[in-house]
Image (cartoon, rainbow, N blue to C red):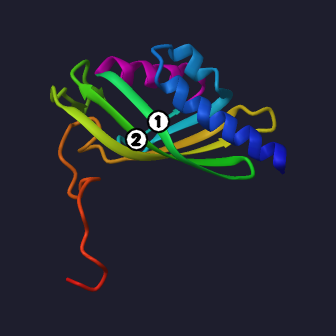
């Protein structure tokens, strides 16, 4: 169990680090041959290293100066959950599908997201589920509650 934890945490931290690089092949190498990347914001599921690499390449081509950092990593056996902060500028290629393209907004964004990473016994990713708000990242809309907002105490409304 301890080795599962180590493998999951190592893979999750590598996922963040390699997503930040402009090297789609290195990112895809984190995945098992039949590994799956699920982008819930866009409703996209990609299976296999070739399609994971394509997803990474398209994101990096759409969002300049993209960078994310792990704020928190929680591990349970072969699964790691990473809360991350990300920033960039949606000023490149369109995202989404051919039928429903999302055109660049030319806006910068600062956002938070969560990715759930599951690994096999070899430490390769078998699945990731990436959760973020598509209006903020990559569109650049202001969140309803900003991270620097002060919330009223519970029960005061």
Residue denoted by label 2: 85
Q: Is residue 23 above or below residue 129?
A: above
Quarter holding residue 87: top left
**Residue furthest to the bottom:** 155
Q: List the residue tagged with mark 1.
A: 69
Disc 2 and disc 1 in contact, CB within 8 angstroms: yes
Marked residue nearer the N-terminal end (2 or 1)? 1
Q: Secondary structure at mark 1?
A: strand
Q: Is residue 128 left or right of residue 156?
A: right
x, y (%) of residue 132? 37, 46
Q: CA distance from mark 2 to mark 1?
A: 5 Å
Q: Is residue 75 above or below residue 96?
A: below
Which residue is at a point 37% across and 36% down the rendered structure image?
86
Task: Mark 2: give few (<14), some (14-19) or many (20+) Cα within 10 Å.
Answer: some
The answer to which quarter of the image holds residue 60 is top left
Q: Which residues are magenta?
A: 47-62
Q: Position of residue 107 (x, y in %)?
A: 17, 30
Q: Is residue 52 magenta?
A: yes
Does residue 10 show up?
A: yes
SS under mark 2: strand
Answer whether residue 91 is magenta in the image.
no
User: Residue 16 vs residue 3: left or right?
Assistant: left
**Percent coordinates x, y for residue 27 in the rendering:** 56, 22
- Which quarter of the figure is the C terminus placed in? bottom left
Task: Residue 18: name its quadrant.
Answer: top right
């Amino acid at each position: 169990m301890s080795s599962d934890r180590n493998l999951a945490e190592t893979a999750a931290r590598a996922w963040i680090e390699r997503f930040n690089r402009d090297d789609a092949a290195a990112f895809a190498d984190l995945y098992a041959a039949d590994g799956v990347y699920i982008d819930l914001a866009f409703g996209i599921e990609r299976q296999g290293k070739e399609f994971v690499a394509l997803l990474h390449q398209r994101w990096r081509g759409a969002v300049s100066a993209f960078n994310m950092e792990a704020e928190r990593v929680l591990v349970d056996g072969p699964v790691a959950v990473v809360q991350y902060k990300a920033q960039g500028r949606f000023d490149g290629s369109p995202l989404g599908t051919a039928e429903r393209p999302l055109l660049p907004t030319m806006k910068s964004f600062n956002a938070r997201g969560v990715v759930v990473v599951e690994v096999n016994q070899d430490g390769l990713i078998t699945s990731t589920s990436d959760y973020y708000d598509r209006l903020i990242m990559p569109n650049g809309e202001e969140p309803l509650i900003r991270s620097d907002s002060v919330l009223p105490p519970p029960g005061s409304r």
